[in-house]
Image: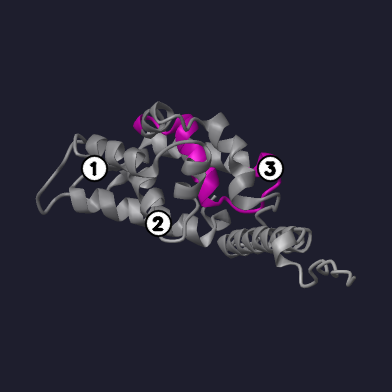
Amino acid sequence: MTDKLTRMSHEALSDAVKRAAAAGNPAVDGLHLLAALIEQDGGTAAPLLRAAGADPAAVLKNADEQLSRLPRAAGATVGAPETSRPLLAALATADKRAKEMSDEYVSTEHLLVGLAADGGQAATVLRQAGAGPDQLLSAFEQVRGRTRVTSPDPEGTYQALEKYSIDLTRSAARASSTRSSAGTPRSAGSSRCSPAAPRTTRC
């Protein structure tokens, strides 16, 4: 599946491995990936969580608390962390979701849904925040529109869509304001022509 990950999915997974290694955790867990996704610059995880009604900061705090309880190892003989079973299951689910949606690459939003479905402790954290797989899937369109993931860098497309949507909203607001101003009747006091005063008839 690694050859079908978007650039940002690759970066998030790489960051997850680095987090596990730096903490001395013997395995890369779904929690590592969840934290990496939420803190990713320009990523879709935080916007998707907000669209699903969850608070990304609260989810991250809970994930960090769970990460602090994971087993740690130290010493020169400690090897590179392995991928945990829950994370492998989450990656498989993310790949399956991408195919079901006819997406050609597994993007960061697929990874988040995979974690919510089969990510072990990460799934628990997400569901407690109200961001289960169904809620996240329902919020997809708010983040990526109806576009399919057909390139390794779809986030640029999402940002363009967001800018286009904002521009449309602003244009509609300006048009509404213009129509409102044009249709406002002048007040009697603002009229340029005032009624002529009645003339006095001479005797």
Label 1, secondary structure: give it. Answer: loop
Is 145 on the left or on the right of 4, as rendered?
A: right
Is 110 on the left or on the right of 20, as rendered?
A: right
Label 2, secondary structure: give it. Answer: loop
| Marking on residue 40 | 2
Identify the residue at horizontal 44%, vertical 48% (top origin): 46
Which amino acid type is shown beneath numbered disc 3?
Answer: Met
| Marking on residue 26 | 1
First to last magenta residue range: 98-121
Is 10 on the left or on the right of 25, as rendered?
A: right
Residue nearest the viewer, comparing 159 with 40: 159
Residue nearest the viewer, comparing 175 with 105: 175
- The quarter in which the C terminus is drawn is bottom right
Q: Tell which tag, 2 or 3, sits nearer the viewer.
A: 2
Residue nearest the viewer, comparing 15 with 109: 109
Q: Main secondary structure of the magenta part?
A: helix
Neighbour tally class for label 2: few under 14, some 14-19, many 20 plus, Cα within 10 Å: some
Quarter occupied by residue 201: bottom right
Q: Tell which tag, 2 or 1, sits nearer the viewer.
A: 2
Question: Can residue 101 be found in the magenta stretch?
Answer: yes
Marks 2 and 1, how far apart at CA: 23 Å
